[in-house]
Amino acid sequence: MRIGLTGGIASGKSTAARWWHQQSIPVIDTDALAHSLTGPGGSALPQLVTRFGPDLVSTKNGMDRQAMRSLILVDPRAKRDLEGVLHPLIAEEADRLAANHDWVIFDVPLLTETGGWRPRVDRVLVVDCSEATQIRRASSRAGWNPTQAADVIRLQASRQARRNVADACLFNDTDDLQSLHQQLAFVARNWGWVVKEFSP
């Protein structure tokens, strides 16, 4: 069973990923793969240097993530170009890591946006919460102000777009871990997993 796990920023997706990991199911974090690909010595760097130049990307030091984030907030073409380089490389590495596992979770923040993940998985699980909750959590955890958090949310797929691709959707508007874990266990059992119980 290949499950694509997604959700907007600060929705609780990472908490859900940890729950699956505690169930002894491999979790492949595509954000971590992206960091590896764009860090020092990363295989995406030659293409990125060609597209964005040495001010944003260095084959020695990797990609300047803060500068790139600022650029893609205002330049949709730059965002498309960045994703055009990274997404195929991420998918290739994710497939390699998933080989020989009966169950695997792909933690894919941009699953809805890319369009290429839905055919690659058996199920899509969305973790959802209100935009107000996203802004509150992102502002407190990431050190962003509410405007910065809202800017990132604006770059992501809408809540409705994510729900449209979901086989199951968990609503996580409170900070109650037990509630989220109960929802996860319900979905996992319905999809055929024998759930291990543990304390939140």
Image (cartoon, rainbow, N blue to C red):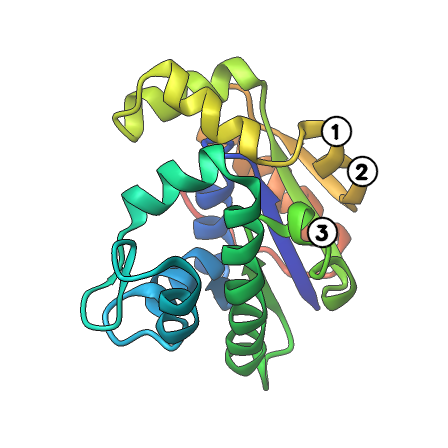
Label 1 secondary element:
helix
The residue located at (52%, 47%) in the rendering is: 79
Amino acid bearing label 1: Gln
The residue located at (51%, 13%) in the rendering is: 132
How far is the residue under mark 2 from the one under mark 1?
Answer: 6 Å
The residue located at (48%, 60%) in the rendering is: 30
Q: Where in the figure is residue 38, as x and y percent of width and height?
A: 34, 64
Label 3 secondary element:
strand
How far is the residue under mark 2 from the one under mark 3?
Answer: 10 Å
How far is the residue under mark 3 from the one under mark 1?
Answer: 14 Å
| 126 or 50: nearer the viewer | 50
Amino acid bearing label 3: Val
Compared with 63, 96 (above or below) is below
Compared with 150, 197 (above or below) is below
Amino acid bearing label 2: Asn
Q: Please indicate, yes or no, whether residue 77 appears anywhere in the rendered image.
A: yes
Q: Where in the figure is residue 2, as x and y percent of width and height?
A: 68, 66
Single out the mark in the foreground, 2 or 3: 2
- What crowding class fits label 3: few (fewer than 14 Cα within 10 Å), some (14-19), or many (20 or more)? many
Task: Say which mark, if any, is on residue 164.
Answer: 2
Q: Where in the figure is residue 166, as x and y percent of width and height?
A: 76, 44
| 25 or 105: nearer the viewer | 105
Position of 103 compared to 142: left or right?
right
Position of 163 compared to 5: left or right?
right
Q: Mark 3 and 1 residues: CB-CB less than 8 Å, in contact? A: no
Task: Say which mark, if any, is on residue 160.
Answer: 1
Q: Earlier in the sequence, mark 3 or mark 1?
A: 3
Position of 107 compared to 113: left or right?
left
Q: Which residue is tagged 3?
A: 124
- What crowding class fits label 2: few (fewer than 14 Cα within 10 Å), some (14-19), or many (20 or more)? few
